[in-house]
């Protein structure tokens, strides 16, 4: 058991970061999949248009969750820079989904909702792996200085 404890202590921050990333990702997945099906099956829009719109909305949620919760301990390099890179990388990850859905519909000629959802799930899985790696590498950078847990003392004594 001592080995497991040491192993956990060594990777504790990574485990917590992955848990947070997974939580935000799970909620974004529900938003993405739910909206994809509303657009595809409810409004009867095309599968690629439905995917682009659903991903844009879920990625906006994911940016806020990842910036202000998952990666809040990392350096903040500017909202404009992070936001641009985040959506650029999400656009690349979206290509995985579009390729899977396009392959299912236009190459395999599978037009039913179940087949298109399976293709969507595969694309989301591949895109998630890419997103986690790319966010850590380019968007939410390692802090160059430790980020304080508490606010610094102001030097002014307060009466209690």
Image: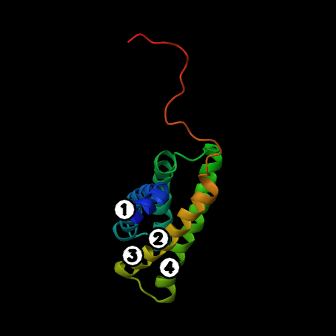
**Quarter of the picture holding the N terminus:** bottom left
Q: Earlier in the sequence, mark 4 or mark 1?
A: 1
Q: Report which residue position mark 1 lands on.
A: 30
- Asked where in the image residue 75 lies, by quadrant, the reply is top right
Which label number is shown at residue 100?
4
- Looking at the image, residue 106 sits to the left or right of residue 81; the answer is left
Q: Which label sits in the foreground, 4 or 2?
A: 2
Q: Position of residue 61 (x, y in %)?
A: 45, 52
**Cα distance between the residues tagged 3 and 2:** 10 Å
Q: Nearer the viewer, residue 34 or 86?
A: 86
Which label number is shown at residue 117?
3
Do the CB atoms of the residues marked 3 and 1 lie less than 8 Å apart?
no
Which label number is shown at residue 124?
2
**Disc 2 secondary structure class:** helix
Residue at 47% from the left image edge and 51% from the top image edge: 70
**Disc 4 secondary structure class:** helix
**Disc 3 secondary structure class:** helix
């Amino acid at each position: 058991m001592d080995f497991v404890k040491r192993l956990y202590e060594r990777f504790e921050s990574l485990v917590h970061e992955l848990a947070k990333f997974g939580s935000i990702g799970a909620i974004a997945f529900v938003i993405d999949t739910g909206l994809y099906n509303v657009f595809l099956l409810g409004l009867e829009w095309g599968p690629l248009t439905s995917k682009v719109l659903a991903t844009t909305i879920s990625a906006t949620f994911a940016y806020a969750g990842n910036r202000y919760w998952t990666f809040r301990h990392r350096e903040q390099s500017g909202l404009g820079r992070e936001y641009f890179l985040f959506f650029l990388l999400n656009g690349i990850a979206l290509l995985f989904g579009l390729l899977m859905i396009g392959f299912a519909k236009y190459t395999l000629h599978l037009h039913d909702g179940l087949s298109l959802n399976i293709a969507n799930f595969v694309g989301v899985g591949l895109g998630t792996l890419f997103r986690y790696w790319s966010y850590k590498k380019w968007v939410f950078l390692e802090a160059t200085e430790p980020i304080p847990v508490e606010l610094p003392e102001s030097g002014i004594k307060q009466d209690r």
